[in-house]
Amino acid sequence: MRVPITDVRRIQLSTFVSSFDRFAMPPILLSIAHGLHLPLAQVVGSASVYYLVYGLMQPLWGMLSNRIGLATIIKWGTFLGSLATFSAAWTNSLLTLTLVRALAGAFFSATIPAALIYVGSTGNAKRRHRDITDLMSGTALGTALSTLVAGTLSAVWGWRWAFVATALIGIIASTFIYHLAELPKISFRAPFISPLVRVLTNRSLLRLLFLGAIDGAAILGIFTFIPTSLESRGSNTAVAAAVTAIYGFAVLVGSRIVGRYTARITRAQFILIGGVMGAAASFILAYSHHLVSAFLACVLLGFCWASMHTSLQSWSTEVAPNERSIAVSFFAASLFAGSAVASAISGGEAQRHEFNGIFLRGALLLLVVATLGNTMRKRWESENE
């Protein structure tokens, strides 16, 4: 069964809003630190809590989604997450900011895996990679516009307006997402434990989760600090955000290119190509501090996400087809857990404006994902022919 085009647009909009909220914080980290008179490392820690909650809640939503209803999860996750983000605009302490952002992360974490499961459950294996690549265009656009809008609003009116804009966009989008058609549900009496055990004993999935954690630590760990590194070197917040926003547009263009060549290039090759491009981007960021270099790096990093990460994400819908919802949610959890750990570890270096080490670590991690991912994907394909 194919997803009707109107529902595809609704699902894309939900991933857009979730991504818009998730990437609103990196370009305003320094502004929040100055506004609340806090060390940058503490604000980075607050963002890390958001990423961690966003990741750890995914398996729970994955196990509940088919019981509550995929469409229901997407609708209410978007709406309640937007309300929580609106609350963040009025916080005056690190504790309240961390709590309401964690709450937003908990709600928005429901939308991405539910959207992937929705598409994965309604498309055939040959089209699934392309469908998921198309779905990620909403994520890419949300990333680009969020970075640009949040950074510009922060520079002109202050960081609180970035959260206000994010919340309003989410609330308005919820009225359109509300009409998303529901898929058949399963009973709450259906077993929870046995599918979970099958997932956690699936060696192929466990290896993929390991790759997902490194993937998140590398790509998202790098992206979190690009705008802050540019600001620390004298760039205006709006300028730094505009340069970083190129990443999202590159993901959008790259997703279209990847979707067009999925029949000619193997998933293993996409993983290798994307990882090498991401590593090149990280080396550029580590050794060149010009805006033009950052622009080029963001383009390469965007293509890395479209090629490598999307291939890994598509793989998560295939590796355990009978427990797809749990497998996809665990992959998302590993991705954002890796991102949270990387951000937390790098907070002190960011506070001291020592960004070279952060980007070099990202480069090495991306090379690990590229080589291991390429080898593991080939082996998995040969074992499942």
Image (cartoon, rainbow, N blue to C red):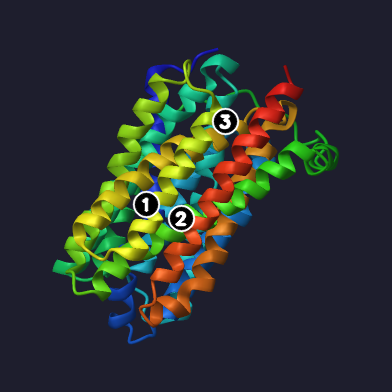
The mark that comes first in sequence, 2 or 3, is 2
Cα distance, mark 2 to mark 1?
Answer: 13 Å
Which x, y percent locates residue 133? Answer: 44, 29
What residue is drawn where x is 61% and y is 32%? 315
**Which residue is label 2 attached to?**
220
Question: Image quadrant for the N terminus?
Answer: top right
Q: Are the two marked residues, 1 and 3, in contact with CB atoms closer than 8 angstroms?
A: no
The amino acid type of the residue labelled 3 equals Ala
Q: Which label number is shown at residue 281?
A: 1
* Residue at (62% x, 51% y) in the render: 334
> Is disc 2 surrounded by few (<14), some (14 to 19) or many (20+) residues within 10 Å?
many
Mark 3 surroundings: few (<14), some (14-19) or many (≥20) residues within 10 A: many
Closer-to-camera residue (87/163): 163
- Residue position for label 3: 268
For marks 1 and 3, give the CA distance. Answer: 20 Å
Classify mark 3: helix, strand or loop.
helix
Which labelled disc corresponds to residue 307?
Answer: none
The residue carrying pointer 1 sits among few (fewer than 14), some (14 to 19) or many (20 or more) residues within 10 Å by Cα, namely many
**Of callouts 1 and 3, the N-terminal one:** 3
Q: Which amino acid does label 1 sit on?
A: Ala
